[in-house]
Image (spheres, rainbow, N blue to C red):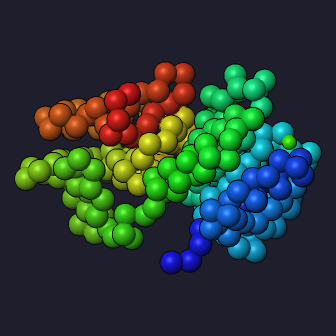
């Protein structure tokens, strides 16, 4: 198995060195960048399996970088963990809007960071590259466009199908209405954010007879998440 590649985007050298040292020792292939421009060049060189992005960077914020990466087809799926200072913690929800997968607040222990990285990488692992995704008995077969729960077919409209497909392939992550519009509706700016709520409601209704509507969770003040955990 090849080592997972992690790119650290952090302008403070001592912190970057400390993180890099710990991750190399844990067997990761570590790359480093001191600002967003360098980060983009490194990503173009060799696509990382995960990014650690500091919130405060000299050329643009880590949040802006995250947003930019999420907007591009080539980089939208790279997991991102944001590094924040205590004072920036209230901005966490803003960061979730930007599409980060997790947060680690400074100062953190190398052990804590490692645990978060492993958890995010586990979640990001593709489901065998197959066309079939299954979560708690809910099965989506993308080759036949069929969704089933146990032995029962779950009838879905095309938008609900796309929404569910997106959720099932991006579990445990919060998406804002705007992000869902971008990624499920393809950025059609004429669609209002309210539309998302309508389709979420329809999707839940279709899952209700199978007691699976709990998988589609509302995250107050942020958006929606597909999760097997309690909301
Ligand atoms: Ca910094």
- Whether 191 is drawn above or below 25: the answer is above
Q: Give the camera-side residue of 206 and 11.
A: 11
Q: Is residue 116 visible?
A: yes
- Whether 117 is drawn above or below 141: the answer is above
Percent position (x, y) of residue 164?
34, 47
Percent position (x, y) of residue 215?
31, 37
Left or right of 58 on screen, residue 84: left
Where's the C terminus, which quadrant? top left
Percent position (x, y) of residue 81?
64, 46
Left or right of 204 on screen, residue 137: left
Q: Give the camera-side residue of 116 and 126.
A: 116
Percent position (x, y) of residue 46?
71, 73
- Whether 170 is drawn above or below 26: the answer is above
Q: Give residue 76's quadrant in the image.
A: bottom right
Residue at position x 32%, y 68% in the image: 131
Residue at position x 74%, y 70% in the image: 44
Left or right of 31 on screen, residue 116: left
Q: Is residue 36 visible?
A: no
């Amino acid at each position: 198995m090849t080592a997972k590649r992690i790119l650290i985007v952090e302008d403070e050298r001592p912190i970057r060195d400390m993180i890099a040292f710990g991750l190399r020792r844990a067997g990761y292939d570590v790359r480093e960048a001191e600002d967003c421009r360098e980060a983009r060049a490194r990503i173009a060189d060799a696509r990382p399996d995960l990014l650690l992005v500091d919130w405060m960077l000299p050329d643009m914020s880590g949040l802006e970088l995250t947003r930019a990466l999420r907007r591009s087809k080539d980089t939208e799926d790279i997991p991102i963990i944001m590094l924040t200072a205590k004072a920036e913690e209230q901005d966490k929800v803003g960061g979730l809007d930007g599409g980060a997968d997790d947060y680690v607040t400074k100062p953190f222990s190398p052990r804590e960071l490692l645990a978060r990285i492993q958890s995010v990488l586990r979640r990001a692992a593709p489901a065998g590259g197959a066309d079939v995704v299954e979560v708690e008995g809910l099965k989506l077969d993308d080759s036949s466009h069929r969704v089933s729960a146990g032995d029962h077919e779950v009838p879905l409209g095309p938008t609900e199908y796309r929404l569910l497909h997106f959720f099932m392939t991006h579990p445990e992550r919060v998406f804002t209405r705007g992000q869902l519009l971008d990624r499920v509706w393809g950025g059609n700016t004429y669609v209002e954010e309210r539309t998302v709520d309508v389709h979420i409601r329809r999707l839940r209704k279709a899952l209700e007879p199978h007691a699976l509507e709990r998988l589609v969770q509302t995250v107050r003040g942020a958006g929606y998440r597909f999760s097997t955990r309690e909301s």
